[in-house]
Image (cartoon, grey):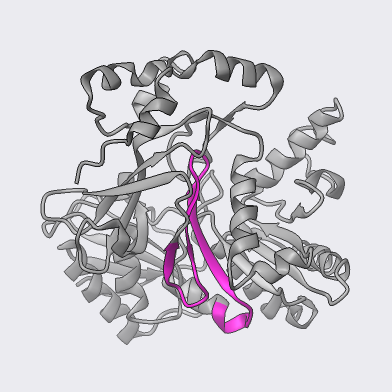
Amino acid sequence: MNAQPTADVVDRIRDIPLYRDSIERGHFPILEKPEIARGFPDNWMTPGLAAALEAGEAEFVLSTGTNHARMQIIRPPYFLLNSYYRLWSEHPDIADTWSEGCRRVSLTTVLATEHVARVNSRKRGEEPAGGAAAEPPARDRWLDARTFYLNLGLDPDHWQRADVERMIAEIRDAARAHPRGRYHLDCSSSHLAHLVRKAVAWGLWADFPRPASIVHAYEYTPANVARYLREHFDCPIVDLFGSTELGYLYYSDRDGRYLPHLDQMSVELVPVAPGSTIHSLIVTSVRNPYMPLVRYRSGDCVRTEDGSTDPERIVRFCGREKELLPTPGGPVSQGDLDDFVSVVTPRVFLHRLYVGGPTDEAVLRCTTFDGAPLDAAETDALAANVRQLVGRPCRVEHHAHLPIGASGKYAWLATTPPPDAGGTHGDAR
């Protein structure tokens, strides 16, 4: 499938230097991220964009970057937030918490909290309170009148009891602001799972106000984490898929089915390798008027219900293209490994696969929700599943902790051999 832009799209990008050659040739190749950065921002500059930057109607920002380099982009202020708010207000399962004016409490990376705090300090003409290394005070953690950020630590597994008590108290304040005690919880799924585990372990779960709706949006949500959250919360839980440069493109219903939100967008799918049923997501979008993207490779991978390239049949967002693992059976995605882990046991919380060591052996390191080691049957089944998936022997290790990345997100794959950190080792298979 080669989805060239419509005449309307071409008219809207005609003055952008980046696209001039493609317009002259009458053919638009897939737009890769390095092309966006080459000559930036001159390759995007038009008189209209220059005027918008001067007037504050457009701004330079960096993409969030999971485990890869961040990309500079141009967009309207609050572009991603407005995309989120629109989906929240229109989603049939959670629109009631929007219309009722429920506060939005956000539990995601500390980098997001720090960004909001820096912006608020600079609005007042000040440096961040206490300097760059200090925790931002509550007054600086409001994104707007509705959204408040909770997290003050890079690794949620290192939260102490006082951190959890503070976050629960701040959640309680948000609930009390509503006449019926309702609030909306926005999160990275792994961060919320950590908070629930610690609240339960420290006898604080009864003090945790239950949200009226939950959205997780900022990273891939493993199947066991999604299951764990459903076990602890009986409200609608919605997953959003999108990016800093595009806004949100898809949303799930409360049963996990994905639906498109392709306002001013179209998508096409391209196999990541010949014969693979994993597809690269290619997006054409004029939603951002200052940086319209034509046949842009987002870097995300999807699967369809029948393995075809029909975007109407997307059923799964399965990770990042740069993180695909080459195997004798073809590329393996984060979602593939997750499926092979979650089918064995719901006890696994975090997992990371290590390859590229001095031997052909892969190492799967896992943590569990209950903290207890995996039993022999679970360990053997996991080792066998990983061997089947990646085509190499596997050793499974239980660990009390898996470190989070500098981005505040978890990597599923590492290509450097892990040091022996005292995990509970299983058998190689």
Region of the chain picked out in magenta, as a range: 230-259
Question: Going by the image, does 210 lie left or right of 362?
Answer: right
Q: Is residue 423 magenta?
A: no
Q: Is residue 83 left or right of residue 418?
A: right
Image position of 181 with respect to 162: above or below: below
159 left or right, relative to 384: right
Q: Tell me where residue 183 sits by quadrant.
A: bottom right
Q: Is residue 368 visible?
A: no
Residue occupying the point 74% across, 65% down: 99
> Which quadrant of the figure contains the C terminus?
bottom left
Exactly how many numbered labels are in the figure?
0
> Toward the viewer: 223 or 99?
99
Does 276 appear above or below 428?
above
Q: Say above or below: 261 vs 426.
A: above
- Residue 211: x %, y % from top left: 71, 73
Q: Nearer the viewer, residue 19 or 160?
A: 19
**Looking at the image, which residue is at 80% across and 29% down?**
122
Residue 4 lies, in percent from the top left, at: 26, 36
